[in-house]
Image: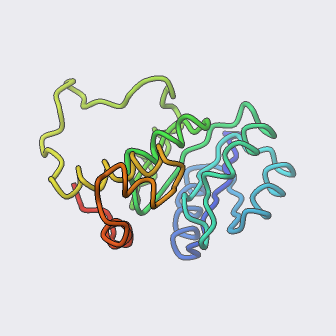
């Protein structure tokens, strides 16, 4: 197997565990933890696949997708995040990622994600809606994220659009996203 994977992750424990699991399956794995190291390693090693963490020690992994796609147009990118949302998933796919997965993720799921067709929407095996619908809190969080994205991250404009006090919106944004 000649597949090479660039693992972009700032959590050393998670990175080491995932790299070890991928190496056991015959993949050559390179690891980078900072945006500068990612671009340098990508150009030096020209990996087939990239596993990209959405949050790199405060920096956005999303900002790395365009330069990675430009440098390696044939490379397939899968975005991983501990704080998944529909809005960031849509943004990642629009920028060129082939899949967006929430952590924790097992190696089999990750490897299947690289073969995902980026134009196709993931659906349940039988085509049915998810067994557990989204909670009201989660739907609210998703809606806030969508409106925030529409206003290019402007908190004041988003609060006006949501007819919400700016401080209330800021408190909601500081909370972790609600579980399904």
Name the residue at 51% across, 28% down.
Answer: 118
Residue 81 lies left or right of residue 140; in this view the side is right
Q: Which residue lies furthest to the bottom in this view?
A: 13
Q: From the viewer's perspective, is residue 159 above or below residue 92?
A: below
Q: Which residue lies furthest to the right in this view?
A: 44
Specify the quadrant of the image occupied by residue 97: top right
How did the renderer colour the structure?
rainbow
Residue 76 lies left or right of residue 43; in this view the side is left
Name the residue at 49% across, 47% down.
Answer: 151
Name the residue at 52% across, 60% down.
Answer: 21
Which of the image's four quarters has the C terminus? bottom left
Viewer-closest of 48 and 155: 155
Q: How many labels does the image show?
A: 0
Residue 127 lies left or right of residue 91; in this view the side is left
Give the percent coordinates (x, y) of residue 37: 78, 64
Which of the image's four quarters has the N terminus? top right
Q: From the viewer's perspective, is residue 32 above or below residue 1?
A: below
Give the percent coordinates (x, y) of residue 75: 69, 37
Q: From the viewer's perspective, is residue 171 above or below residue 119?
A: below
Viewer-closest of 141 and 49: 141
Name the residue at 66% across, 52% down.
Answer: 63
Give the percent coordinates (x, y) of residue 170: 38, 70
Residue 38 lies left or right of residue 157; in this view the side is right
Viewer-closest of 142 and 36: 142
């Amino acid at each position: 197997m000649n597949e090479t994977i660039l693992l972009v992750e700032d959590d050393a424990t998670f990175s080491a565990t995932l790299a070890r699991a991928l190496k056991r399956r015959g993949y050559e794995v390179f690891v980078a933890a900072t945006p500068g190291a990612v671009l340098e390693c990508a150009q030096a090693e020209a990996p087939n696949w990239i596993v990209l963490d959405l949050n790199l020690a405060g920096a956005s992994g999303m900002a790395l997708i365009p330069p990675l796609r430009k440098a390696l147009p044939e490379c397939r990118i899968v975005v991983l995040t501990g704080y998944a949302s529909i809005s960031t998933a849509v943004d990642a796919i629009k920028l060129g990622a082939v899949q967006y997965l929430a952590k924790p993720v097992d190696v089999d799921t990750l490897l299947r994600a690289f073969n995902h067709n980026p134009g196709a929407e993931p659906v349940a095996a039988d085509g049915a809606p998810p067994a557990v619908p989204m909670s009201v809190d989660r739907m609210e969080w998703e809606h806030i994220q969508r409106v925030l994205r529409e206003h290019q991250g402007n908190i004041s404009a988003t609060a006006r659009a949501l007819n919400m006090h700016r401080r209330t919106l800021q408190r909601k944004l500081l909370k972790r996203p609600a579980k399904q």
